[in-house]
Image: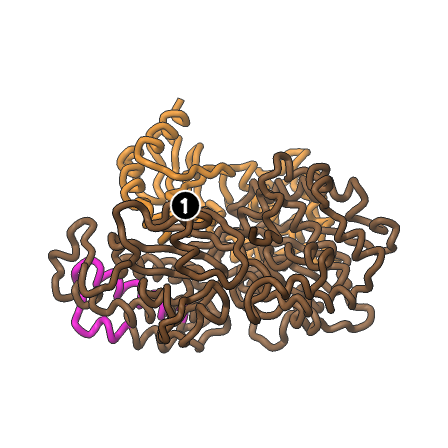
Chain colours: A orange, B brown
Amino acid sequence: MTTETNHSAIQFTPDRLERAKEIISRYPEGKQKSALLPLLHLLQEQEGWTSVEGMDYVARMLDLQPIEVYEVATFYTMFHLNPVGKHVIEYCRTGPCCLMGGEEVYAHLKTRLGIDAGQTTVDGRFTLKEVECLAACGMGPVFQIREKYYMNLTNERVDEIIDELSK
Amino acid sequence: MATKILTEHINVPGIETFDVYRKQGGYTAVEKALKTMTPDAIVEEVKKAGVRGRGGAGFPMGMKWSFLAKPEGVPRYLVCNADESEPGTFKDHYLMKNIPHLLIEGMIISSYALGANKSFIYVRGELMYVIHILEKAIAEAKAKGFLGKNILGSGYDLELVVQPGGGAYICGEETALLESLEGKRGNPRNKPPFPAVKGLYQCPTVVNNVESIATTSWIVNNGGDAYAAIGIGRSTGTKLISASGHINKPGVYEIELGVPVEDFIFADEWCGGIRPGHKFKALVAGGSSVPILPANLALTLANGEKRLMSYESLSDGGFATGTMLGSGGFIVFDETSCIVRNTWNFSRFYHHESCGQCSPCREGTGWMEKVLHRIEYGHGHQQDIDLLVDVAKKIEGNTICPLGDAAAWPVASAIRHFRDEFQWHIDHPSEATQPGAVYRGEMALI
């Protein structure tokens, strides 16, 4: 394992570095590539998004070629490959949520934020992303912000949430 | 009172903690298994139970376990598939967040039965809060001596690792999941070799769903025969059904297999009927990938008997008049639902989630989405319906993994049963594009 990071602008904070080492130790000898997804999540949690510098840093840590990290990070939808706003709203656009009025609520949310999917508000506070099924279909419409699920959404509830997060 | 195998204690306050779970009889199955049973004896009980894989495929779990290769000096792995991402399916999410120790207890028993000393729970990355719940529960179990070295003095060691995914439905396919767990893109592998021979790190591996693994505690405590006595025919035991859509009481219900579909939808014990003032139009019984059925076929078989919630009854008549129990993702549609729009929505999902490895799936799912989009938005051509049927046929069975089939079946079945709605969209483009427009033709509503 290589952990020389002096030439990188990005480094894990000391506690995250400990966590990273603990994650790498979970896998059998020589299978440290298995730590890639957990480390990318850790990187994104720290930096807010998954930058090329960050991916290069993770590649060095796991003794991987940078391309091995890029091809993985671009495959999975959870990694933000561009900078995002303070709150990333991940809105479920899939069937069961739509049956419960998900499309109307989504239209309201977009109007309220003044942005479309994939965009960030000018004040940098909100980024809107569309996601496929969040596995909360009985409580739809649903969106997720970081680790929190917001369920049974209505236009009024959306306004309340946005007001609260705008403070 | 119906038997509850998984959810009996789910509403007990504090059940997510080790102590409360233990007080409710938790971890007694681990004690019984490790102290009084050989691994082979456990496999035998699971075989007797006849429990079928609860992730959707319905393959007998005991048989899958008995296929596991056991070469000398090579580690074996158990991997729990907790990558639940199929539209309409949210039962594993419910189980893990509410009663995490049930899964962990099942993982210990199953790992012991299979001779695995390191096991993984691969959880979809979006459920990061559930991952924290599981990690906390694992730490508790370890502190109490139920995980780690020499569990309960039995000489058996087990380390349990929770692995986050990255947001890809395809990783619910077992070989794509293994690729992802090895830190790669989630591209399914060709089979054979099957994971039971060459799985994780090219070692013998069993991949089981959360709900399947969670049943093992009850089977060890009560015996495989007692499990097999519940349910109906080869659909033994109970099943978690995640119910959503236009019903009065959406949620997760544990049913004994064999309950009539009609009772499940209309009885207060379960879905509580269609929302007030509306009629039952259509049903997707087992997650978005299974064929959709119109109301009359959802409730009755072609021979007029009641359709039951079981693997056999739901698939009665094949795809001409039947569907599948699948993962138990039960989506109910009332008369306000536009089948064309819903089919387009599902198609968009499969196009988005195709890993792109096989041409029929990569290209075909995109075609279906585009053609459905133009029909829905009033630009459909007369030949489009047949084109969709043709594309669906060309995807089905021609891909490495079942995602191709999963994408084709909703489209093919929607056209089979609701062709007049598609035709109406093509014939009446201006009406069809009005907000909320739904064709109300000859469809029998219940």
In what element is the residue under mark 1?
Answer: loop
Residue type at numbered disc 1: Lys
Q: Is residue B380 magenta?
A: yes
Q: Residue at x 25, y 55 (%)?
A: B335
Q: Is residue B201 visible?
A: no
Q: Left of A113 or right of it: where is B46?
A: right
Assign the C terminus of chain B to one quadrant of the image: bottom left
- Residue B339, given in percent of the width and then of the height, sits at 27, 60
Classify residue B3 by image quadrant.
Answer: bottom right
In the figure, B43 relative to A27: above or below?
below
Q: From this viewpoint, which residue is outermost toward the top?
A: A167
Q: Residue at x 39, y 74 (%)?
A: B319
In the figure, A158 relative to B371: above or below?
above
Q: Is residue A122 visible?
A: yes
Label 1: how many residues lie within 10 Å, few (<14), some (14-19) or many (20+)?
Answer: some
- Residue B78, given in percent of the width and then of the height, sits at 69, 61
Q: Left of B143 or right of it: where is A11?
A: left
- Residue A34, given in percent of the width and then of the height, sits at 65, 55
In the figure, B124 relative to A19: above or below?
below
Q: Residue at x 34, y 41 (%)?
A: A119
Q: Is residue B61 magenta?
A: no
User: Label 1 belongs to which residue?
Assistant: B249
Which segment did they paint magenta? Answer: B361-388
Magenta stretch: dominant secondary structure: helix
Classify residue A126 by image quadrant.
Answer: top left
Count of numbered marks: 1
